[in-house]
């Protein structure tokens, strides 16, 4: 695998030869400074930098340098427990490997006879056992000690040995406080002439509770002599997490008490970032087309990079831009000009508002150019104001200039922010050139830049062949899921997204020609991404309804095809997806839909030959999903505006009214929780006079709270106590709106 391919998969630098921004020189100097502290000293050093600035790359290179420069009996450990998904605490992630190192070093110093005896007994050395006791005490680990010890690297039989030795006997061997144990461990580290350098990365990704864990580890739990900590973080982000986690007034001030020495990661030069982007685009062209780009291409790309690449601030933004280009370009290379696509990607990364504006403007321009419609003076004025606002976000004068922008976006006249006109007439010659060169300004090709569109507004059969091929391949499933979700953020030729176009073409005649395995991946996608699909649409339009998409019908077709192939195996698959699928709100609504199909809920039962499952199969799925609902996965819904209402009705149909009322009662004991539940149960209403709004229809939800009288009485009581006035006001307003129609 080439370095370029590696960089695509892992954005952080892992080897000096991959370094593009001079981090290896910084790492070498920093390693020398750390060594200068000396083995006898202890310190906490902070490497500070914003997200995406290259902290992980620097830390990787620093680790390499420290390994080369470290003194004898010095061990370098890299700790990032929140990234492994194992649930292991930070304390355990450090102290368990530490116990393994100390055990190995103690064994090395033993006589051959003592070492043989230890190996026969399959037990840890004394200090390692003390450290395991200390780990269990400080990590608040509730697992049996034998299980904890089994995690020590290089001691695979520790669990069995300790099982044979009573845990209570071990603990009673020498009762010690954590302070005593820490002192004993510290003395042993010094006595054995050991030292440790601990690298802690990605601290700025921590939740407040995890930030507290870091503070506790560095400040008290593992404040051993001969320990040098290197912490990597975005200072403002970590300070905020500490502030929330510890409840302190000033998180940055508290952080200063922990970190004795701080080092700000130098921001890469703009020239280096632009050079990296330029080289990446040229390399992409060569890879996809099998030839070098011509001089005109190089000149145009240089101009794009110089003007809009100047807004790049971090290596991560460069990688993000290049990865998005790599993802898109190969599939549409015959319909786009790569420097223009690079322009779009740069503004998408550095100025997303301008990207959205460009898409909107070109959409309207295509209508004007075709003669199918016009843009009112008011709309033009609004577009102009939005453009001025977007351009003002750039730092460079060239990027702010309308004169620069119209090189890529036609029909704009004016200078800088003094825009004179939008949708200006383009000459026939310019139109011909833009079309011949497949430029962004071409009315024939612009759609490809945003939506992978075809002139006929139909995705080719080859696209669906590839989609189903990925669907049948477990390794390619993540890429397929990302591809489908990305289609939500891009519009087709009409106002519909390409995701909607894809759904519309997943008809029964298309699906019946596919294998059960090919259908399985797509069905899994809906069970895992159904909630994210609707969330993305709500980000585009807060009033979007899940019924605006025909996802459920596509899921029906996929499921039917799989059932026709192997009914028993498919039911096992469906049960697994129901219990383990991450889109559990969508799953609930889909099960409700199936219940309505069969007449097991609602009043619109479909003919038996149109039902996906029989009553027995459906009741089995229903029963198992009820078990899942009882496991407490509903708490997050309280924070999702407008989601709980629709879910409650699905839940009632699946599990019965009593289950819902029981949960409502349990989670509305406090006044605030009661009010938040009411607000979550608001319904989306459309009125020709008022438009879209959220209304609280008390008559529909009152039974969940013991009846309308009890609901109103409780609301009046909260109001009389003047508790949570803002929430009460919102509830009252929502009730009033429900009476207006």
Image (tube, rainbow, N blue to C red):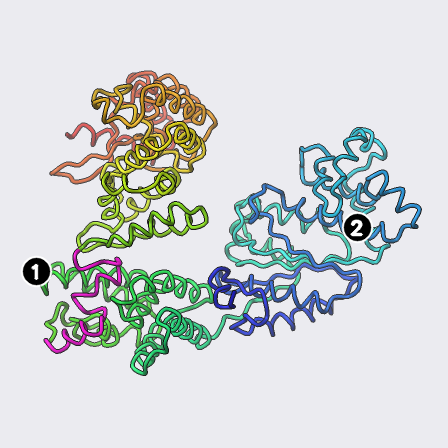
Q: How many badges with numbers are in the image?
A: 2
Residue named by callout 1 = 374
- Highlighted range, magenta: 428-456
For mark 1, does the 10 Å Cα neighbourhood hold few (<14), some (14 to 19), or many (20 or more) residues? Answer: some
Q: Which mark is residue 102?
A: 2
Q: Position of residue 236 (x, y in %)?
A: 51, 57
Which circle's residue, 2 or 1, is located before the other in the chain? 2
Q: Is residue 624 magenta?
A: no
- Residue 603 versus residue 507: which sits nearer the camera? 507
> Residue at coordinates 51% horizontally, 60% vertically from top-left?
10
Q: Is residue 433 magenta?
A: yes
Q: Position of residue 166 (x, y in %)?
A: 80, 29
Q: Position of residue 34 (x, y in %)?
A: 70, 66
Helix, strand or loop under label 1: loop
For mark 2, does the 10 Å Cα neighbourhood hold few (<14), some (14 to 19), or many (20 or more) residues? Answer: many
Q: Position of residue 42 (x, y in %)?
A: 74, 59
- Residue 291 versus residue 42: which sits nearer the camera? 291
Task: Please tell me in which quadrant of the rendered image residue 450 appears.
Answer: bottom left
Say if 573 sits above or below 152 in the image: above
Mark 2 vs mark 1, CA separation in Å: 77 Å
Between label 2 and label 1, give the one nearer the viewer: 2
> Residue at coordinates 39% horizontally, 31% vertically from top-left?
570
Evaluate whether residue 310 shows in this view. no
Q: From this viewpoint, which residue is outermost toward the bottom? A: 295
Please identify the quadrant where the C terminus is shown: top left
Task: Please tell me in which quadrant of the rendered image residue 460 appears.
Answer: bottom left
């Amino acid at each position: 695998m080439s370095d370029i391919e590696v960089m695509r998969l892992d954005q952080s630098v892992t080897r000096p030869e991959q370094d593009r921004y001079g981090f290896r020189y910084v790492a070498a100097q920093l390693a020398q400074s750390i060594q200068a502290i000396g083995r006898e000293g202890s310190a906490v050093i902070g490497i500070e930098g914003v997200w995406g600035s290259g902290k992980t790359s620097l830390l990787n290179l620093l680790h390499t340098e420290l390994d080369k420069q470290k003194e004898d009996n010095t061990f370098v450990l890299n700790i990032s427990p929140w990234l492994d998904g194992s649930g292991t605490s930070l304390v355990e992630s450090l102290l368990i490997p530490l116990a393994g190192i100390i055990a190995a070093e103690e064994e090395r110093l033993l006589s051959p006879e003592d070492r043989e005896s230890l190996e026969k007994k399959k037990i840890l050395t004394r200090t390692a056992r003390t450290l395991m006791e200390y780990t269990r005490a400080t990590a608040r680990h509730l697992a049996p000690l034998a299980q904890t010890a089994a995690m020590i690297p290089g001691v695979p039989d520790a669990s069995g040995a300790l099982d044979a030795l009573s845990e209570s006997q071990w603990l009673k061997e020498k009762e010690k406080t954590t302070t005593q144990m820490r002192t004993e461990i510290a003395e042993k580290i010094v006595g054995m002439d050991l030292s440790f350098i601990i690298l802690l990365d990605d601290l700025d990704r921590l939740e407040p509770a995890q930030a507290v864990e870091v503070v506790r580890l560095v400040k008290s739990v593992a404040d051993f002599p001969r320990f040098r900590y290197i912490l990597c973080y975005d200072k403002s982000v970590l300070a905020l997490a500490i502030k929330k986690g510890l409840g302190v007034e000033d998180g940055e001030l508290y952080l200063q008490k922990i970190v004795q020495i701080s080092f700000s990661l130098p921001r890469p030069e703009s020239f280096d970032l632009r050079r990296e982007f330029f080289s990446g685009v040229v390399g992409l062209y060569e890879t996809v087309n099998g030839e070098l780009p011509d001089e005109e291409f190089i000149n145009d790309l240089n101009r794009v990079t110089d003007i809009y690449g100047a807004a790049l601030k971090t290596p991560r933004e460069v990688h993000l831009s290049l990865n998005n280009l790599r993802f898109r370009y190969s599939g549409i290379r015959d319909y786009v000009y790569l420097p223009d696509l690079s322009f779009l990607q740069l503004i998408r990364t550095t100025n997303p508002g301008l990207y959205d504006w460009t898409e909107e403007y070109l959409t309207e321009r295509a209508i004007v150019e075709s003669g199918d419609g016009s843009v009112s003076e008011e709309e033009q004025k609004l577009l102009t104001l939005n453009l001025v606002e977007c351009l003002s976000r750039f730092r460079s004068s060239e990027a702010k200039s309308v004169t620069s922008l119209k090189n890529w976006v036609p029909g704009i006249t004016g200078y800088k922010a003094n825009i004179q006109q939008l949708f200006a007439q383009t000459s026939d010659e310019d139109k011909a050139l833009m079309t011949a060169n497949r430029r962004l300004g071409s009315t024939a090709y612009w759609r490809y830049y945003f939506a992978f569109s075809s002139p006929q507004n139909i995705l080719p059969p080859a696209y669906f062949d590839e989609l189903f091929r990925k669907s049948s391949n477990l390794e390619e499933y993540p890429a397929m899921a990302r591809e489908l979700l990305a289609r939500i953020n891009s519009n087709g030729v009409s106002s519909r997204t390409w995701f909607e176009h894809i759904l519309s073409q997943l008809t029964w005649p298309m699906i019946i020609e596919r294998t059960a395995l090919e259908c399985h991946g797509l069905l899994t996608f809906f069970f895992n991404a159904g909630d994210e699909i609707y969330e993305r649409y709500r980000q585009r339009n807060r009033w979007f309804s899940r019924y605006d998409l025909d996802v459920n019908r596509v899921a029906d077709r996929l499921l039917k095809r799989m059932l026709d192939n192997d009914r028993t195996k498919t039911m096992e698959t469906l049960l697994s997806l129901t219990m383990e699928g991450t889109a559990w709100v969508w799953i609930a609504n889909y099960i409700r839909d199936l219940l309505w199909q069969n007449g097991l809920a609602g009043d619109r039962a479909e003919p038996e030959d149109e039902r996906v499952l029989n009553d027995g199969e459906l009741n089995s799925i229903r029963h198992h999903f009820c078990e899942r609902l009882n496991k407490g996965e509903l708490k997050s819904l309280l924070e999702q505006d407008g989601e709980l209402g629709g879910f409650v009705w699905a839940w009632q149909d699946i599990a019965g009214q009593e289950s819902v009322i029981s949960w409502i009662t349990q989670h509305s004991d406090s006044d605030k929780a009661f009010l938040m539940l009411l607000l979550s149960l608001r319904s989306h209403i459309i009125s020709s006079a008022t438009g879209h709004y959220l209304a609280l229809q008390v008559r529909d939800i009152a039974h969940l709270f013991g009846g309308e009288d009890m609901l109103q009485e409780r609301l009046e009581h909260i109001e009389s106590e003047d508790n949570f006035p803002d929430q009460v006001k919102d509830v009252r307003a929502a009730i009033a709106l429900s009476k207006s129609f």
